[in-house]
Image: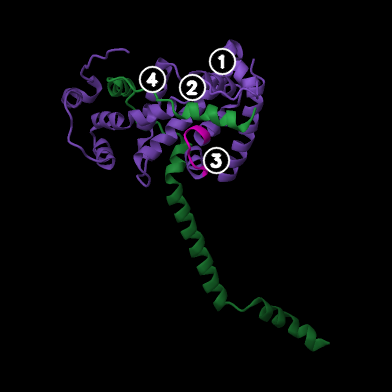
């Protein structure tokens, strides 16, 4: 965990930097996201910090499914908020701000998986323990596996899939999102989501069987 | 690999508590924004995306005006069958 010293943000001018620092020191009066966005658009960029504070846990919860390393996760979350900041003009307020942010986070995750896939070819896969492999390949073994080992197995098999397959399985099977929700965050049609999920599940099974 | 085992793996992932952001995370984001405050680096496609509903409505309105004016003009002008009949009249009379 890195401690962060709160310093004035020069780009927002002294007055705004003061306001921002005060915002970090005490609780601001509660207003809804639409009101905050209105203030940001009317020339108070420091209000974006409040939006970040409100939605950071949600963004972390989405991205944690795709990146476990804390530093890389932090970079990914920062990148998500930065993209949100840059395209704030495109947010029309028809859907809640969190839905719009989720969409950006999911796309950031997909980009991240694609980059990871390219570098994976050079790095290779981590090896699984003997217990995990025994449980995996022995159908008679009905005992429950340790949760950490189970996550390790799933992670190893998922990394063998394409970024799109990983995404659809994570959203559908782990996050329990509906096909309609997945369609909304990914921009894929409902039919594409269903077909992709079905094929991804089959490929995951194959990948699990092939784990050594 | 049976479905029961697959469900077990998914459940393990489902029950995992996600990592929480550091206390100063919002400040780090604001620092990033400070380094690059430009908010609207809009590309041509972004601009088109933003303007799409308005451009589409204007285009639809222009098409509607054209269709209506064509219909009005056509209602005053003689129909095609009448014109054809008029043209063929002398030939019919000759024969």
Residue extent of the magenta highlight:
A173-179
Mark 4 nearby-residue class (10 Å; few <14, some 14–19, many ≥20): many
Give the image location of residue B15, x and y in percent.
44, 28
Mark 3 nearby-residue class (10 Å; few <14, some 14–19, many ≥20): some
Identify the subunit bearing mark 1.
Answer: A
Give the image location of residue A60, x and y in percent.
38, 26
Cα separation between marks 1 and 3: 26 Å
Q: Quadrant location of the C terminus of chain B?
A: bottom right
Position of residue A9 relative to residue A90, above or below, is above
Instruction: Mark 4 vs mark 2: tell me if same chain.
Output: yes
**Among the two numbered marks 4 and 2 on one chain, the one whose residue lies closer to the N terminus:** 4
Instruction: Mark 2 vs mark 1: tell me if same chain.
Output: yes
Display colour scheme:
by chain
User: In the rendered image, which residue does mark 4 sit on?
Assistant: A74
Q: Secondary structure at mark 2?
A: helix
Identify the subunit bearing mark 4.
Answer: A
Say whether marks 2 and 3 touch (CB < 8 Å): no
Q: Which residue is painted at 29% across and 24% down in the image?
A: B26
Asked which quadrant contains residue A104, the reply is top left
Foreground label between 4 and 2: 2
Relative side of A20 to B57, left or right:
left
Please tell me the colour of chain A.
purple
Q: Is residue A125 visible?
A: no
Cα separation between marks 4 and 1: 19 Å
Q: Give residue A119's mark.
A: 1
The green chain is B
Q: Give residue A188's mark.
A: 3
Relative side of A45 to A135, left or right:
left
Q: Secondary structure at mark 4?
A: helix
Q: Secondary structure at mark 1?
A: helix
Is residue A178 shown in magenta? yes
């Amino acid at each position: 965990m890195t401690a962060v010293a709160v310093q004035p943000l020069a780009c927002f001018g002294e007055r705004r930097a003061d306001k921002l620092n005060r915002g970090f020191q005490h609780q601001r009066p509660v207003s809804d996201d639409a009101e905050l966005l209105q203030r940001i658009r009317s020339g108070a960029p420091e209000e974006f910090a409040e939006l970040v504070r409100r939605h950071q846990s949600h963004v972390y919860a989405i991205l944690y499914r795709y990146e476990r390393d804390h530093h890389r996760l932090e970079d990914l979350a920062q990148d998500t908020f930065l993209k949100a900041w840059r395209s704030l003009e495109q947010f029309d307020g028809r859907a809640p701000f969190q839905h719009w942010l989720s969409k950006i986070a999911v796309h950031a995750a997909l980009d991240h998986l694609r980059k990871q896939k390219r570098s994976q070819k050079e790095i290779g896969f981590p090896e699984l323990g003997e217990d995990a492999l025994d449980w995996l390949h022995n159908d008679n073994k009905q005992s429950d596996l340790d949760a950490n080992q189970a996550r390790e197995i799933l992670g190893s098999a998922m990394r063998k899939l394409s970024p799109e397959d990983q995404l659809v399985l994570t959203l559908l099977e782990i996050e329990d999102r509906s096909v309609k929700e997945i369609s909304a965050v990914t921009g894929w049609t409902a039919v594409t989501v269903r077909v992709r999920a079905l094929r991804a599940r089959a490929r995951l099974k194959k990948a699990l069987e092939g784990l050594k | 690999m049976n479905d029961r085992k697959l469900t077990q793996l998914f459940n393990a992932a489902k029950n995992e508590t996600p990592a929480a952001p550091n206390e100063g995370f919002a400040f780090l984001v604001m620092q990033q924004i400070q380094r690059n405050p430009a908010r609207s680096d809009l590309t041509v496609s972004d601009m088109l995306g933003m303007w799409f509903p308005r451009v589409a409505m204007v285009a639809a309105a222009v098409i509607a005006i054209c269709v209506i004016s064509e219909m009005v003009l056509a209602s005053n002008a003689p129909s095609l069958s009448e014109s054809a009949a008029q043209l063929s009249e002398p030939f019919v009379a000759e024969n």
